[in-house]
Every structure is written in structure tokens, then in C-alpha cells.
Image (cartoon, helix red, strand yellow):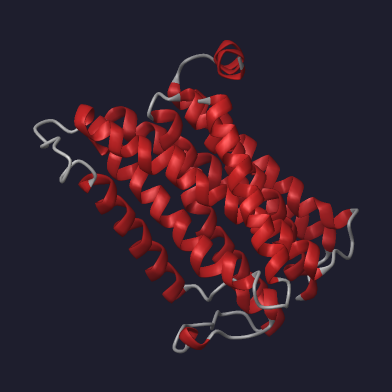
Amino acid sequence: MVTDIFVDLIGDNAIVQALVGGTVIALLNLLGASLVLVWRDPSERALDGALGFAAGVMMAAAFTSLIVPGIDATEILVPGFPADGLLRPLPVLIGIALGVLVLDRGDAFVPHAHILLTGRRRADAAGQSERLPIDDPRIASVVLFILAITLHNVPEGLAVGVGFGSGDVGGALALMLAIGIQNVPEGLAVSIAAINAGLDRRLYAAIAGVRAGVVEIPLAVIGAVAVTVVEPLLPYAMGFAAGAMLFVISDEIVPETHTRGHERVATLGTMSGVLVMLYLDVALG
């Protein structure tokens, strides 16, 4: 069984497992960003289908690996909390709301990622700051874009850490694979956008690998430490990670895959991603 093999290789320390999980998703992000070195001009149709697949995987993972296990853990890990049917989901729901709020406020300070992906400003982006103390507008745009993508990688690293910190290694492995899978097309799309903005292919691939590692690996460890040391935080943390991921999917990925005339391909990609994640969850859980 995959879970047993992972434990035999890595051990049963949740923090070490989270470190490995964070490293895996960061490497897959680097793999996606590096695809521009060999797949130099992917079509918009292919990108929309791949991003739709990534959205489907992440959407299913948010529910199967974070929300549902978080609700199940509430009765055990929150001392004195009423465990009846009406109040049991409350810690996870609070976490989801906080995750959405943090990502929403983050987007208010860091411009939407789609500005460089599509070259268009969204109607609800009015008033967002786009000024940096950089003279070259093109480089400033690339820096802002990297900041936006980094913000969106935060819940991914946190989710992997929280997953391993929960003690459910099978569920955490499924979540790690889900996030890693979606990091590949996302990394490719981000690289293409950065190249269109004027960055060198090799340079941006290297930047992407460093950025993903700096963000996702420590956050995975922090997530595991937090829920291991303070166990009652687990349902809130799982809800937070799920809410943040669902916000990114709904606010950025899905809308952008439906703006270039490839809605059906993107939708079929999303459905395929949901099926793959459901299979992974059952096979590894």
C-alpha cells in the first residue's frame, strides 16, 4: 500500500512528512514552470483544458481531504465543543470564511494574476494598487505577477502541512498529489505569462522553482507544527486552507479558462480532475 511505503521511507513524524510533502509540490511547480523549455508554444485550448483539470483536482481535494475530515475531527479535537449535528461543522466553516477573507484582502493589495495572463483588467479590480518602486514598467508587472502567484501558493503549502499534521497519512498523500498535479499546468501557465512580459525562459524557470520552494516548503512545515502542537486548531486550519483554495479556483482559475472560447474543453478538464481526485482519495485513504 502506498501509505505504508511512504511511512516506511519517511517515518511517522508528521513534521518530517510535511517537509517531504512541501518539497514534492514545490518540485512539481518547478517541473510545470520548466516545461516552457521544451513545450515552447502551447495553445490556449491546451492550457485552458490543463488549468480546468487542475481546478477540478483542487476542488475535489478541498472537500475530500480538508473540509470533510475537518468536520469529522471537530468532535475529537475541540474540548467542550457541542458535537450535535447543527454545531459540529462550525469550526471548519469559520476556517473557510477566514481563508476566503485573507485571500480576498490579499488580492486587494496584490493585483489579480489574470492581468498578465490575459492582458485585460477585470471590472472589479478598479482601485487596486499596481505601483512598485521599479522604473521599468515591464519588470514591475512581472514582479507584481510573481507576488500574486506566490499569494495563491500560500494555501497549497499550508494545506499539505495541515493534512500531514492531522495524522491521516493517506488523505495527506492524496492532497499532496492533488496539489502537485495542479501545480504542473499552473506553473506552465505562469511561465508563459512571465515570458510574454519579457522574462527569459531559463531565468523565469529558475525563479519559479526558488519561489515555490521558499513559499510552499516552510508553510507545509508550519501547518504541521501548528496543528500538532495545538490540536484543537486542526478543524479551523483545514477549513482555512480549503476556503483559500476554493477562493483561488473560483476567483482566478475557472473564470480565466472561460474567457478565450474554450469553455467546453475547460469544463471537461474540470470534470476529469474531479474524477481523478476522487479516485486518489479512495485509493490512498
Residue 141 left/right relative to 18:
right
Of 43 and 85, which appears nearest the observer? Answer: 85
Quadrant of the snapshot with the N terminus: top right
- Residue 104 percent across, percent down from the top left: 40, 69
- Residue 84 percent across, percent down from the top left: 13, 37
- Residue 29 percent across, percent down from the top left: 68, 48
Residue at horizontal 58 percent and vertical 40 percent from the top: 277
Measured along the vertical axis of the image, is residue 211 above or below residue 134?
above
Q: Residue most toward the top?
A: 8
Residue at horizontal 50 percent and vertical 62 percent from the top: 248
Residue 58 left/right relative to 197:
left
Residue at horizontal 58 percent and vertical 29 percent from the top: 20
- Residue 103 percent across, percent down from the top left: 41, 63
Residue 106 in which image quadrant: bottom left
Measured along the vertical axis of the image, is residue 219 above or below residue 113?
above
Residue 181 in which image quadrant: top right
Measured along the vertical axis of the image, is residue 196 above or below residue 124?
above
Residue at horizontal 45 percent and vertical 62 percent from the top: 247
Residue 176 in which image quadrant: top right
Count numbered badges in the picture: 0
Measured along the vertical axis of the image, is residue 174 above or below residue 131?
above
